[in-house]
Amino acid sequence: MDDVLVRLALVAVVGLAALGAAHLSRRSGQPRHPPVDLSGTDLPGGVVLFTSTDCSSCDEARAVLRGAGIEFREVTWELEASVAERAGVGGVPLAVFRDASGATVAQLAGVPRRAALQRALAAMSAPGQMLGGGEQAT
């Protein structure tokens, strides 16, 4: 009888932990992506958007950036796979924000949300500022 109760308690704890993790990931806003390294590329400073040709989320991300009047350099996986691989890009869309010195100050995985986009743009103009929250700073 005690063994059954222990097992039920363990199942309940694991279930609650999974629900908690799912809730926290939804609250953070932007999906996460491991930090990328653009130092080994010849990509310019500013915003770099990694995309794929057959990706509706990439189309949305492109439209959000254009709609906000943001100039960006697009790296399409099918056309420049070596650049994306060298940078460590594992998923698209991925927007990488670099300051004037070329240092990465933020990266947004998925379709950028307005608030995350504004914080990333602010970080580009504030040297040494790193982002937290839904967006990823590197």
Image: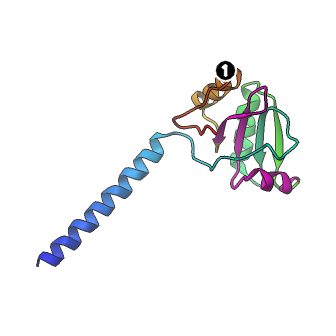
Q: Is residue 118 above or below residue 75?
A: above
Q: Identify which residue, 115 or 124, lies in the foreground.
A: 124
Does residue 16 appear left or right of residue 96 in this picture? left
Q: Identify which residue, 54 or 92, lies in the foreground.
A: 92
Q: How is the image coloured?
A: rainbow
Q: Quadrant of residue 71?
A: top right
Q: Is residue 129 above or below residue 85?
A: above
The magenta region covers: 80-108
Mark 1 nearby-residue class (10 Å; few <14, some 14–19, many ≥20): few
Q: Is residue 7 above or below residue 111?
A: below
Q: Which residue is mark 1?
A: 126
Residue 84 colored in magenta in the image: yes
Residue 119: x and y in percent read 61, 26
Image quarter (top left, top right, bottom left or bottom right) of the C terminus: top right
Regarding residue 63, the answer to whether it shows in the image is yes
Please give the count of numbered marks on the rendered protein.
Answer: 1
Could you say whether the residue bearing mark 1 is in a helix, strand or loop? loop
Residue 135: x and y in percent read 58, 37
Does residue 25 appear left or right of residue 44 in this picture? left
Image quarter (top left, top right, bottom left or bottom right) of the N terminus: bottom left
Residue 30 colored in magenta in the image: no
Q: Amino acid at mark 1?
A: Ala
Residue drawn where x is 71% and y is 40% of the image: 95
Does residue 93 appear left or right of residue 77 in this picture? left
Q: Is residue 17 above or below residue 42?
A: below
Q: Quadrant of residue 66?
A: top right
Residue 43: x and y in percent read 85, 40
Residue drawn where x is 64% and y is 37% of the image: 112
Regarding residue 53, the answer to whether it shows in the image is no
Q: Quadrant of residue 14?
A: bottom left
Residue 106: x and y in percent read 65, 35
Residue drawn where x is 84% and y is 51% of the image: 83
